[in-house]
Image: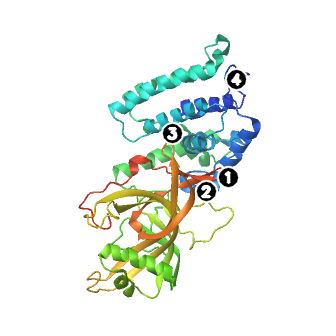
Amino acid sequence: MHLIYENLLKNLILLWTDEFKGLDEGSGCYTLSKAVWEAVGQATAASGSTIPSAFGARPPNIASDRSNFTAENYSFWALYIGPILLRNKFRDRKYYDHFVDLIVLLNICLQFELTVYDVETIRTGFVHWVQKFEDLYYQHDPARISACPLTIHAILHIAESILAAGPVWAYWAFPMERYCATLLPAIKSRRFPFASIDKFVTDTAQLTHIKHIYNARDELTLTRIPGPMQGEFRSPGYPTCALLPPRKLEALSTAIMSKIAIALATRFNVSVNVARRHLPDEIFQYGKVRRIDGGDTMSASEITKSSVDRRDASYVRYEMLVDKNTNKRSREPEFRLETYYGQLKRIFVVKLEATPDLPDTPTILFMAAITNCIIDSRNKLDMHFYSRQGRTEVVDITCIQCLVGRIRYDNQWAIIDRSGSLARALHSDDDNDEA
């Protein structure tokens, strides 16, 4: 953790801003102008409004407020913000590509599981990265030897550390900082601070022993155990999510009702007119949906109130089965799972009575209206860029996978999907409608 976020990344930023140990850029051209770096800092601070709070603390201005950057801030900036805001900012693209190569390697390091091939990729990748670093910054000039501190050599041993201690997420977790943070509230006396800390550590250890010996973890916990929220609505048909207030019951517009009918017609294999006939006149709408067991809480933008300091939590990644033979009616349907991004607009609770045309028992469906983002391009880090939104479609709530963030880049928006490509859902032919 300290190797990358408290040393290597900080040193790169110092090099880019012409503040590293009095070194100029020599024969290279890697320094960013003051105006460019200030613009990057302002964009970093502004990104907090379009990145959900579930992703972490609001990022400070990296140009003017770097003293308030923690290792966690540096980590998030390097993995998600930097690759977007530094795009096309260097006079020579090779410096940006070199930085992106570092982030690619860090993403592999942070995978939950690593194969032997992954570890070898990390080993050879860092060897090539260090060699390129020497070409770009050290420039093979003995007078610039200070550009190569020990931390540059240390990253060559990350692969060995993984083989010895496992994936880095097991120990790049800021354990000492977090433990010290738990001790701060224990200091009740300014005159005898260490006595307060000693008593807190002893009491905590004794309580932990009792919890484990008598299996009384829940009964003796000092933290509130999260339970159902007031106004929360759940349905047995949707065990993975819960709907949260605000809630309202109203008659929907003809356009929205038609989209719901189309979704039902596809689900139950009936005509749109049949599906529309069985819809109730008024439908409950909820403002938020929460993935149970530690998942994201996503907001419906047209139901929840917005404010200047609110962080946008309405953009999501969702997945749908799409027929590859839609335009070839003579062929049998062949479905594939496609990933989409969009803004969650509304959340519906559709209650259907038992009828021969639809389900033969009363059914409650959770559905969502999502406005699709039309993807223009993606980069080497699988970050997607869009400049406009498309149509609004109604899907089952289980199609929504997770929250995503956004960062403004020129005339486009870059989508931050922290789940990564490995979290994409897989489809098998025997999945049911709510899988």
Which disc is residue 155 wearing? Answer: none
Percent x, y for residue 269? 29, 75
Determine crowd level at label 3: few under 14, some 14-19, many 20+ residues with C-alpha closer than 10 A.
few
> Marks 1/2: CA distance?
8 Å
Identify the residue under disc 2.
Answer: 50
Mark nearer the N terminus (2 vs 4): 4
Which of labels 1 and 4 is toward the front?
4
At a point 66% along the width and 47% down the height, the residue shown is: 44
Query: Which of the two residues, 46 or 193, is positioned nearer the viewer here?
Result: 46
The kind of residue tagged 3 is Pro
The residue singled out by tag 3 in the image is: 175
Check if mark 1's residue and mark 2's residue have beta carbons within 8 Å: yes
Q: Alpha carbon of mark 2 to alpha carbon of mark 4: how far?
A: 35 Å
Question: From the viewer's perspective, is residue 221 above or below residue 302?
Answer: above
Which residue is at a point 36% across and 76% down the rendered structure image?
264
**In this image, 401 relative to 362: left or right?**
right
Q: Is residue 256 above or below residue 429?
A: below
Density class for disc 4 (Cα within 10 Å; few <14, some 14-19, many ≥20) is some
Q: Secondary structure at mark 1?
A: helix
Alpha carbons under labels 1 and 4: distance apart = 30 Å
Compare marks 3 and 2 and give the one earlier in the sequence.
Answer: 2
Q: Which mark is residue 25?
A: 4
**Element on which disc 2 rests:** helix
Question: 396 or 90, which lies in front?
Answer: 90
Quarter of the rendering containing residue 321: bottom left
Q: What residue do we see at 55% from left, 45% from top?
A: 80
